[in-house]
Amino acid sequence: MPYEVKEEAGKDGRKIFLIQKENFLELMTDLRKQGYDHLSLITAVDFRDRIELVYHLQKSASNFELLTVRTVTYDSTIDSVTSIWESANWDEREQYDMMGVVFRGHPNLKRILLPEGWVGYPLRKDYDLSKNQYVNMDDEGNDRVSFDPGDGW
Amino acid sequence: MEGQLNSRYVELNMGPQHPSTHGVLRLKLLLDGETVKNVEPVIGYLHRNAEKICELDYYCDSLIYFDRMDYVAAMNMEVGYLEAAEKLLAIEPPERVKWIRVIMAELNRLASHLVWAGAFGLDLGMITPFFYFFEEREKILNLFTEICGSRQETNYMSIGGVYQDFNDKIIFKIKQFLKQFPKKMEGAYSLFIKNDIFLSRTKGIGILEPEVALSYGVTGPMLRASGVPYDVRKDAPYLVYDKLNFDIPISKGKDVLARCIVRFEEMRQSVKILNQALDKIPDGPYFNPKAKKSLMIRLRGEGDVYARTESPKGEFGVHLVGDGTVKPYRLHVRSPAFKNLSVLPFLSRDVLIADMVAISGSIDLVFGEVDR
Amino acid sequence: MKTGDAGFITTTLENALEWGRSNSIWPFTFGLACCAIEMMATQASRLDISRFGSEVFRNSPRQSDLMIVSGTVTKKMAPRLKRLYDEMPYPKYVIAMGVCVIQGGPYNQGYSVVMGVDRVVPVDVYVPGCPPTPEALTHGIMLLQDKIRKREGK
Ligand code: SF4
């Protein structure tokens, strides 16, 4: 393999691959070729100075055995895997929405759960919960987010 | 085409408050006559920041948010969270607790599928089955009330145990319920399966090929209806499922009807599991003394774990990261309905609007879980 | 009545109207979350809500006069809720079902939940509980009927 993969066992005994961000997409492509055809979950964990991305893959041919791939990004960007698994589409949008991770090459990277225009990424540790944001709707049915209550609140 | 009048296609907005979207789903449809050309689901109308609040609370407090995720299958959600939390906190529940959890989870699976069946009937314009299914569900909820004091959002389990022990009376009552349940269920099932209108509205609609399903991350009855026998209870057994004898129903039909049949077959299997578990349940303590009520808020966890369980909607995964304090550092939920919904745009290309309603009904959406 | 017979007749007519109104409340299915399932259970076999004249759940705001807000109202949903409320014809009533709708409930530390639907629409009856049992909702509807008959707040 042209890149280096560190392997370790997790606390609950699952197999974990650690990979550099640069070789991340190559590894994922290879894993898909090895039969990991089910991308179960993408999680981003905010450690203040860095964001760790955890991918849980499964192989349908051998009883859906679990494999975890872990990588770290310091500038909140990572390559998108939507071209490999369709299910990454919504998962990556969710992580973008909640954590502000930008997935390079994603076809439609916009907020999925919160309305467009929301300020901040709520699951980050430095998100300010004391500031209220309000949502209003214009005539076309689009959301307008603002910090002042405005009409109807 | 920007700015031009396009008279061929009509844009239609369905939801977020619509009787057949099962809650607060909004669908942006692009229609050509009555044919759906494109669907864009808009979700997030029930985004209740559960993951953020869990980070602010103790490990044991997070349970109530899990109850309210898949609110028709609260027990299954609790099992899912506790699988992860107990791994992280290194607390093993006693043997009896595992059996109790299996019994409660399977009872709730029945209740969840009954709600689905009732709502699915309503989607297709059948009102009668709804009452039969809800009557049976009401009986299950009565059992829950007797065991844990609450009907729906039970909050029955806790880290390392359950809040109250089973007694013989309860076991007797569950057995009584199970005796009459299959007959009632089959009766209501025949309202579905012997009805020509129902068959013609579900057969051959919404075909989902197994490769597509896997690539979209679809799990649960939807995946099994496409012929892939994936069930966490069999493939990676948790609790005591490896000591129980049951089958994983699959179907080769791949369509809406197949999903319906698979769900009903699952109910029969659940009854089978329940009957075995009620006979085999061992004696013993009902909580782990390391996680007594007074010690519960002092539990600390470090590292990260991922646990998957089989909820009525599919593979329910909990990824839990601890940093050595009494509160979770990060908690992320793999919600099966979220993934199953993402396949709706693919399934409803070039179908009629009425068929799209049948397809979205067959996904079994619960928005507490999709949006969290 | 002091003003004479005509006054007497109008009051009784209004009373009769309110009596009729209170016994034929048509609720609008505004199910949002967990409480909606209990609302469905209220409608189903065991606790048949039609005993109180409210069995006709309408899916259109234009045909209904009671909005049972059952389930968490999020900030994204609130403007839609307000619009649907505005579309209902007078006289209209609102029941807030569940603690989420009353003050945010279990989610009130968060960022995306409205702390009480009464910040968006006026509420007539509050039914606490998480979720309230179907019996509690039935009681809430009976309270509302009382309120309509007594013409409180008019
Ligand atoms: S009050 Fe409780 S049961 Fe009702 S919607 Fe809120 S969390 Fe769910």
Image (cartoon, coloured by chain):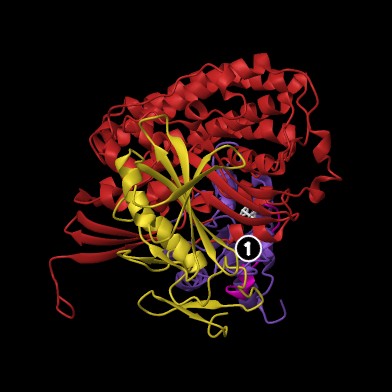
Chain colours: A yellow, B red, C purple
Residue at left offset 51%, top offset 30%? B236
Quadrant the N terminus of chain B occupies: bottom left
Percent of width and height locating residue B282: 73, 17
Instruction: Find out if the beta carbon at label 1 lies less than 8 Å from the nearest ligand 1 atom.
Output: yes
Image height of B190 relative to C30, above or below: above
Report in which chain the residue with disc 1 lies.
Answer: C
Which quadrant: the C terminus of chain B? bottom right
Q: Position of residue B360 (x, y in %)?
A: 35, 47
Which residue is identified by label 1? C101
Residue placed most toward the observer, B61 or B94: B94
Point 32% across, 56% down: residue: A82
**Percent x, y for residue A150?**
54, 85
**Can residue C98 be seen here?**
no
Q: Is residue C125 magenta?
A: yes
- Is residue B276 visible to the viewer in this orientation of the structure? yes
Residue at 65 percent across and 18 percent down: it is B278
* On screen, residue A136 above or below B187: below
**Span colored in magenta:** C117-131
Frontmost residue, B76 versus A150: B76
For ligand 1, the image quadrant comes to bottom right
Prevalent SS, magenta region = loop
Left or right of A41 in this view: B147:
right
The location of residue A134, given as percent across then percent down, is: 55, 78
Q: Does the magenta portion include B226?
A: no
Q: How many marks?
A: 1
Label 1 crowd bin: few (<14), some (14–19), many (20+), radius 10 Å: many
